[in-house]
Image (tube, rainbow, N blue to C red):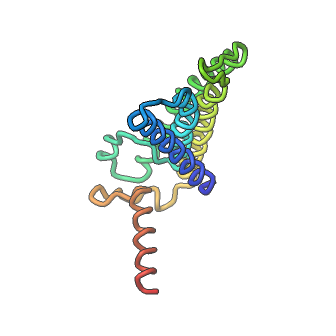
Amino acid sequence: METFFRYTLTLLISTVAGFQFVQVITRYVFETPVMGLEEVAVIPTLWLYILGAINASREDTQIRANVLDIFLDTERARHILLIISETLSIAISIWLTIWAWDYLNYAWRVWKETPTLYLPTFIYDSALFTGLLFMTLFTGWHLLKNIQFMIKGGPSADQAVDHDYPDTSEVAEFSVLDNHEEGRSRG
């Protein structure tokens, strides 16, 4: 799945950048804008945002304000906080997914089209429901992993949290990259 997101997001952001480049060149250099380019550019742009949000949810790297983590002393306390926050996230995500489903049904029923190129807006209307559905599923998956951690417990659950050098996914990713670079310099 990592490969799918890596290449799809790269393709989408390159497409959006290409559209913007063409628009700037045609509008300001040739003084003739390409009609309908904005309508076409909305599709990869919206899917880029939504797939990026899904990927962040999948990796559990979405932006959070973890202010309470400073006051927690053990991994068990940190996981209890994660379980509470992910339960709230799932409740809100389910609610928003239901709204997105209703909107998707409306968009299917009405079948709107863009004004210039007559593209069906359902192409990007469906992105919202798809994104919220997958974000809800991935948040549920992370919730289950945290509940499993709490049930299994063990010595790692009572391990003290090092506030000076937190062990986050970003730190782990940088250490993997650092080890990879060390291997390159030796070889």
- Position of residue 45 measured from the top left corner of the image (x, y, whole percent): 52, 36
Question: Which residue is situated farthest in the left direction here?
Answer: 164
Q: Nearer the viewer, residue 121 or 27?
A: 27
Q: Quadrant of residue 36?
A: top right
Seen from this angle, which residue lies furthest bottom? 187
Residue 78 image point, x, y percent: 41, 47
Residue 20 picture location, percent across and down: 46, 39
Which residue is the extreme one toward the front?
Answer: 30
Residue at (38%, 35%) from the top-left corner?
28
Count the marks.
0
Location of residue 139 by image quarter:
top right
Q: Is residue 153 visible?
A: yes
Residue 91 shows in this picture: no
Q: Residue furthest top?
A: 110
Residue 174 location (% of width, % of height) = 40, 64
Q: Nearer the viewer, residue 128 or 10?
A: 10
Q: Is residue 116 above or below residue 31?
A: above
Residue 166 against residue 53 in the figure, above or below: below
Q: Residue at x 43, y 41 (%)?
A: 81
Please name the residue shown 46% across and 48% down the image.
61
Between 63 and 31, the residue placed more toward the observer is 31
Residue, x 52% and y 55% (percent of image)?
153
Instruction: Name the one closer to the observer, 5 or 63.
Output: 5
On screen, residue 142 versus residue 20, left or right, reads right
Asked if 110 appears above or below 172 in the picture, the reply is above
